[in-house]
Image (cartoon, coloured by chain):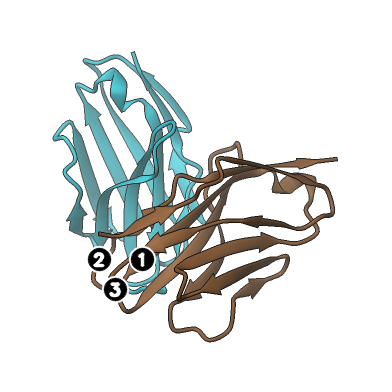
Chain colours: A cyan, B brown
Amino acid sequence: ETGVTQTPRHLVMGMTNKKSLKCEQHLGHNAMYWYKQSAKKPLELMFVYSLEERVENNSVPSRFSPECPNSSHLFLHLHTLQPEDSALYLCASSQESSPSIRDTQYFGPGTRLTVL
Amino acid sequence: AQKITQTQPGMFVQEKEAVTLDCTYDTSDQSYGLFWYKQPSSGEMIFLIYQGSYDEQNATEGRYSLNFQKARKSANLVISASQLGDSAMYFCAMRGSIGGFKTIFGAGTRLFVKA
């Protein structure tokens, strides 16, 4: 496989469930990102990992818990979510391990999450 | 604070014609990068084109070009010879030199290409 893959593509969960989103990048990149895309709102950065270390945490509620076991894999663990957490969750990766204005992010297809 | 503004929520263009999607930005950074992404209904954000704030030439990538006017803080995307497959959401984004890994995105413009 090439690029950035995300599983599952669609997820429906109740507020008491625990689930995980998975992202894998096959580009040899050093940084990985989680974004939330809600209807009629700009893309919101949630977390950034560089070389498996979390470098950005954008005031995200603790019911979202990221994990980056290696530079190719990124997880988002979900528990006791709220209906307003329903959104498209996008994973991205980029080459640089240090911030650079030229560092292009490449995105996966996203996971469409619905919280009932 | 950094901000990206895309004032056109929706745009229509006839197939084979050119279209310009507007993007203005606000930043106090001296050095920054500007990006355009395409998001089809499938959801994936596809990178289209990049312009650096110190690049003297406007960026071009195939049918995509960026009309960069630094003094006016605008970075409009021009799509030439529109195709039906160009129908999608288009997002302008910016990363500054002092914002770390943060990239801010505009609200997007939905482009409809008519046959």
Marker count (numbered): 3
Q: Which mark is residue B95?
A: 1
Q: Is residue B93 visible?
A: yes
Vertical placement of residue B9 versus B78, above or below: above
Viewer-proximal residue among B72 and B32: B72
Are the residues flagged by discs 2 and 1 in contact, CB closer than 8 Å? yes
The amino acid type, in three-letter code, at marker 3 is Asp
Which element is circle 3 on? loop
Q: CA distance from mark 2 to mark 1?
A: 7 Å
Residue under pointer 2? B99
Are the residues flagged by discs 3 and 2 in contact, CB closer than 8 Å? yes
Q: Which mark is residue B29?
A: 3
Residue A9 horizontal/vertical position (percent): 48, 33
Q: CA distance from mark 3 to mark 1?
A: 9 Å
**Quarter of the image holding residue A6?**
top left
Q: Is residue A1 visible?
A: no
The amino acid type, in three-letter code, at marker 2 is Gly
* In this picture, residue B88 sits left or right of residue B56: right
Vertical placement of residue B49 versus A13, above or below: below
Which element is circle 2 on? loop
Q: Chain of mark 3?
A: B
**Quarter of the image holding residue B95?**
bottom left
